[in-house]
Structure formats: C-alpha cells, structure tokens
C-alpha cells in the first residue's frame, strides 16, 4: 500500500489514471493530447511505472504501424473511488 501511495504522489500519475478512468482505453498519442503539458518521455516513464504496478495494461497489436492501447487493469479500477474524490 505504501508503494501505491508514493507512486500516486509522483508527477502526472493521478492525471494519467484519471484520464484512463474517464475516457477508457487510449493510444499513446491520444493520452498525450489529453494530459496537457506532459512530455513523451515522461508519459512513457509513468506508463511503464503504472504497468509495473499492475494498474495499467498495455495491449500491443502487431499491425503496420503497431497499435498500442493503454487501459486500467482491475487493480487500477480499484482506485476509482479515490480518483473520483480527487476529481
């Protein structure tokens, strides 16, 4: 639990989770447009951290070009109540 709280306090984390909660699964570019001001590098870093914590799922489709979609996992949806209160 301590790890989750520290991660939520990290830069951009709650904004990313809020956008995935509100708008559902999104591709990287779409998420970057919605999280105003975040750099591609920071978004990539935050998404990897959230994926490592099993809060975000990365779905990869081997198409040309490749299609990658990010969505909340079941564990990520468990934070819905907390995220709703922050909104």
Image (tube, helix red, strand yellow):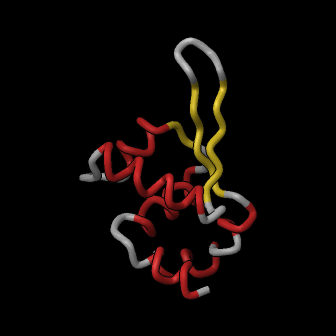
Residue at image coords 59%, 59%: 52
- Examine the rendered structure and indicate whether residue 65 appears above or below residue 82: above
Residue 15: quarter of image: bottom left
Residue 32: quarter of image: top left
Q: Position of residue 8 (x, y in %)?
A: 47, 75
- Examine the rendered structure and indicate whether residue 67 appears above or below residue 37: above
- Examine the rendered structure and indicate whether residue 28 appears above or below residue 83: above
> Does 86 sit left or right of 77 as displayed?
left
Quadrant assignment for the N terminus: bottom right
User: Residue farthest to the right?
Assistant: 74
Q: Nearer the viewer, residue 23 or 26?
A: 26
Q: Nearer the viewer, residue 83 or 40?
A: 40
Q: Nearer the viewer, residue 41 or 18?
A: 41
> Does 3 sit left or right of 16 as displayed?
right
Residue at image coords 38%, 50%: 43
User: Residue farthest to the top?
Assistant: 64
Q: Nearer the viewer, residue 42 or 22?
A: 42
- Examine the rendered structure and indicate whether residue 59 appears above or below residue 18: above
Residue at image coords 45%, 59%: 16
Q: Position of residue 22 (x, y in %)?
A: 56, 58
Q: Position of residue 33 (x, y in %)?
A: 35, 42
Residue 11: quarter of image: bottom left
User: What is the number of callouts on the image?
Assistant: 0
Residue at image coords 50%, 53%: 48
């Amino acid at each position: 639990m301590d790890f989750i709280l520290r991660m939520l306090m990290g830069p951009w984390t709650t904004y990313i989770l809020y956008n995935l909660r509100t708008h559902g699964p999104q591709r990287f570019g779409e998420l970057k447009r919605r999280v105003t001001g975040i750099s591609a590098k920071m978004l990539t870093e935050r998404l990897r951290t959230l994926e490592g914590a099993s809060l975000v799922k990365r779905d990869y489709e081997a198409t040309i070009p490749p299609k990658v979609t990010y969505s909340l996992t079941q564990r990520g949806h468990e934070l819905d109540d907390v995220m709703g209160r922050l909104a």
